[in-house]
Structures are given as C-alpha cells and as structure tokens.
Amino acid sequence: MSERIGCIGLGLMGKPMAHNLLKAGFQVTVYNRSKVAIKELSMQGALVAQSSQAVAEQSDIVITMLPDDAAVESVITDEQGIIAGAHENLLVIDMSTISPLTATRLAEQLARHHVHMLDAPVSGGDVGAIAGTLSIMVGGEQNDFERALPVFSALGKTVTYCGPQGSGQTVKACNQVVVALIIAAISEGLVLGSKAGVRPEIIVQVLSGGLAQNRVMDLRGSTMITHHFEPGGKVQFHRKDLGIALQLARSYNVSLPLTALVDQFFTTMIANQQGNLDHSALLTILEMLSHHSLVQE
Amino acid sequence: MSERIGCIGLGLMGKPMAHNLLKAGFQVTVYNRSKVAIKELSMQGALVAQSSQAVAEQSDIVITMLPDDAAVESVITDEQGIIAGAHENLLVIDMSTISPLTATRLAEQLARHHVHMLDAPVSGGDVGAIAGTLSIMVGGEQNDFERALPVFSALGKTVTYCGPQGSGQTVKACNQVVVALIIAAISEGLVLGSKAGVRPEIIVQVLSGGLAQNRVMDLRGSTMITHHFEPGGKVQFHRKDLGIALQLARSYNVSLPLTALVDQFFTTMIANQQGNLDHSALLTILEMLSHHSLVQE
C-alpha cells in the first residue's frame, strides 16, 4: 500500500504540488491557513484536516511548503503542530527554502519524538511546481531519501541526494548565490557595452556563443534588454534566499564579498518598490548607478 | 585574385593564425620581433618582411596580433610602421585585445593616411587559434567588414559585426567582465557550500541542471574542485582585459562595482605568483578569504 501523504502550506508552490500528488494516485490530506486553496483541492479529492497536528496523525509522510523559517518552525512545534501529532514511522519533508541551520535544528527536535526529517528545497518556481518538473535538493538520512523517492518523482524531474540534514538547503543557498551573481555579471556587461555605444542585442548574441554563455542570459537576456521584468523569480524571494546564504556564511566564517554587495542592491530594489519584479531587474540598479538605460527613450 | 595578407605579431595566437591563412591559400607576408616563428612560417610558405612598413607595402590587408595597446600603437605609428608603408586600398585589421579608446584613436590616425581599420578581437584562446575556430568580434565600417570576411572565415567559426570603430573591442571587454564575474560566482557558491559541509561535486551537479548553469562551470567546474589550474585563459591576461574594461567604464562614467572588486582579486593573484594559472584559480582567493580549501589535505 502506498504511503498516505499530508500537505501543509498550499500557496503558489504548495497547491500545485498537492495536486500533482493526487494525480499520481496518493491519498493526500491537506491543511492551510487560508481556506480558498483547501476548497479547490478538496474538490480534486484531497482529505481536509483542521490542524497540522491532524495532518500528521492521518499521514505517513508530511510535506511542508511554507514561506519562511518562522512558518516552518511554527507548523512543527506549535501546540497543534506536527510534533503534537507525532507517531511511529512519520517522516517530515520540508520543501520550503529556509536556513540550513534552522533545518538541522528542527530535524533534531523532531528526532527527539522519533520523527525523521528531510530538507528538500526546490528550484523551478511555480511553473516547475505546476508541471511537476521541479529540481529537488535533498538533505537527511539516505534511508529516508529512498523512502521518499516515489513522492519526489511525482513532484520533480531531477532529485539529488546532497548529504546529511541541512545539505539540501545548503545547496539551494549556493544555487541562489550563483544565480544572483550571474544576473549581476550580465548587468555589468550590458551596461558597460551599451553606454559605450554597442547595441545590447549584439552583446548578448556574441556572449551566448562563447565562454560567457549562461542559462540566465539564454532565458532572460532579451527581456532584460527590453526591461520586461514579469516574474519568474521575484526579487523579494531572492533577497530572502541571499539572507539565508549570508547567515549561513557568517556562521561558518565564509566571506562572500560579491554576494554581500548584490544583497545590498536587492535591498535597494525592495526600497524602490521593485520587490515583485523578476530578479533580472537587478539590471536597473546597475543602470541607475551609471545614469544609463538600455531602453532608448 | 585574392587579397595579399600581412601578419604582424607571431606569438601564441598570431603564429597559428598566419598558418591557417597560408592553409586557406592566401599569400602571407610576416613580420615579428622574435625570429623563431618567422623561420617556421617561412618554411610553410610565408614571405618574410624586414619591418611593419615592408609588410604594409607588400599587402592589401595587414593583420596585427600583439600583446597590448602600446605594441599595436608602435607597429602602426613607428618610423618603420604601417603608416610609413601606407597605400591606397590598405586595410588594417587589429585582432589584439586592446582598449576600444585606443582602437578608435588609431583608426582615426590611419584614416588621415586613407587607410581603413577594423578592430577584431577574438575569443577562444590558442586552442581556437590553432583549430581556426575563434569567435571574432568586429568593429568598423560595414564595407570593410565584408571585404575582410574571407580572411575571418579562415581564422574563426563565429564572426559578428558589432558596430562602428571600437565596437569589437567593447564587446570583447563585456565578455571578459561577464566571464570574470561568473568565475567569482561559482567560487563563492562552492566555498560556501563546501565549508558548510556539502561535497563540491554535488553542488556542481545540481547547479548545472538548473538556472545556475553556465559554460565556465561546464568546462571548469570539475578542475576547480580538484585545483587543476592549467591554462586555458591566464590570470595575467584576464586582469589586463579587466583593466581595459575598467578604463572604458571610467571614460563613459559606467560604475562596475563587482568587476572592480574581482580586478583587485586578480591583482592579489598576480602578487601571489599566480598570474600564469588559469583564471578559474580565482577560486583560491575566495578560499583564502574564508581559510578553507575545497581539496581535502
């Protein structure tokens, strides 16, 4: 008999993920603070629970998909949280993006109640969540990882075991560092070339054919040039992720000078009401610093 | 009848390029300060001239491939330089990587003697020069670009017209900015993840499958992890190129905060006798800043 799944958190990511689990034939019990998504999933065949505790009691595997560290901690440790519903054989898979330090601490707390935990953050955004093509980075015990594979297969395309507890979140943090700095790299290149008189389309075309090629530019080069910044990956979420990376770096005494700088630029964007734009809008900060726009007025 | 080609500068790049022009059936006249390369090309069928002036006198198109701005300026303006050998219909193609500002100034100087000029820097390194697969970025008049196409075809795979005089050098500068910052991006990601306990091979594997994918990591990810820094693109040349980019940026009032920082790191590498390593050795500076090495002792 296949495992009974619980889903806590039915937002932009969590809702389509629960839907994909139902489609894959799992029994799914859901809980969410806001009731709209619950109704929708219930009509698709999900069972509805009244608390995180109830989800845990009625499930073998509980997936949490929540906005931040505080939300995950609360769902696990609150009076009517997962620990209150703990039972033998329960596995918690947190697929939110949170600090590796928080993930490790919560795993230890759950372990005291004989509950196992995996950290399994994703990349691929809401598009990947809907299509079931997420990339999933998993930290925790290898046994638990193998147990969870059928669940991951319903949600994602690439699933990678990264190491012990927290490793999934650590790899996600690395990913967000590299993506942010690549956006900054493209931005500095484009502002330099454009203000020096070359059409930015030419720059993207030439750079795409050589060592400077990168997927951000493949996907976003043309929209950066025309200032089309519909998300995609929102600035506010990427800044949250850089906050996690910088906190992790601080705790391990890792110096990240470029990441720290780009984090400041993301903060400027949020101050400028740009938090809901695609993260490639970082270009506009580099433009502002040089009083130049790629878009001809 | 096909154009007579002159080649000035027969170093790591210039020598195989002259060889490929001979192979393509062009008449090639060569001049070089050091005589070893001259002998080799003469045995392959090249004519040998005694000065840059003589090369210009005996050629329709003169290609210069030299280490820096001063060398290009000297070859063009010296007493026995190209201008001294100027004649109607002469086209100078400078394929060195120099400042767009110098390129534009030299083009203006040549124009006073009715000599046309293209700036046509390349990427692809000595490997690309030998294989005839260079990527060539061309600035200048469109007519001259079209006249030079048969020559470019013998040397490179991708040839892009970038705009007026200096545009080829500007795009090359943008390319070097983006590549340098991508190396820095990978380095920050790897040092963070590795010091936080994840195997760097896992980080490269996961990041390669998503938005963080980039060609530097595809080609150099595994050698960065094992600290194999055989060039490839040398630190000293990349620092020279960032110097050009930062000088160009200063003249156009373009602010490049990340590039300026990475340029300082390259300087530290040269101070540390790392100038002849591959530029991906920038990783070791980020490692040093965090007192951590990806390579287990």
Image: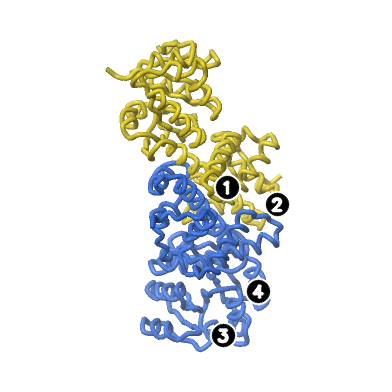
Chain colours: A blue, B yellow
Q: Which residue is mark 2?
A: B290
Label for residue B259?
1
Could you tell me which quadrant the N terminus of chain B lies in? top left
Q: Are marks 3 and 2 in contact (CB under 8 Å)?
A: no
Q: Amino acid at mark 4?
A: Ala
Q: Which residue is mark 4?
A: A111
Q: Position of residue B247 (x, y in %)?
A: 56, 41
Name the secondary structure under disc 4.
Answer: helix
- Compute the Cα span from label 3 to label 4: 16 Å
Q: Which residue is mark 3?
A: A53
- Compute the Cα span from label 1 to label 4: 46 Å
Q: Amino acid at mark 1?
A: Thr
Name the secondary structure under disc 1.
Answer: helix
How many residues crowd mark 1 within 10 Å: few (<14), some (14–19), many (20+)?
A: many
**Is B69 positioned to the left or the right of B104 in the image?**
right
**Is A39 positioned to the left or the right of A89 in the image?**
left
> Tag 3, which chain?
A
Q: Amino acid at mark 3?
A: Gln
Q: Amino acid at mark 2?
A: Ser
Q: Position of residue B98 (x, y in %)?
A: 51, 33
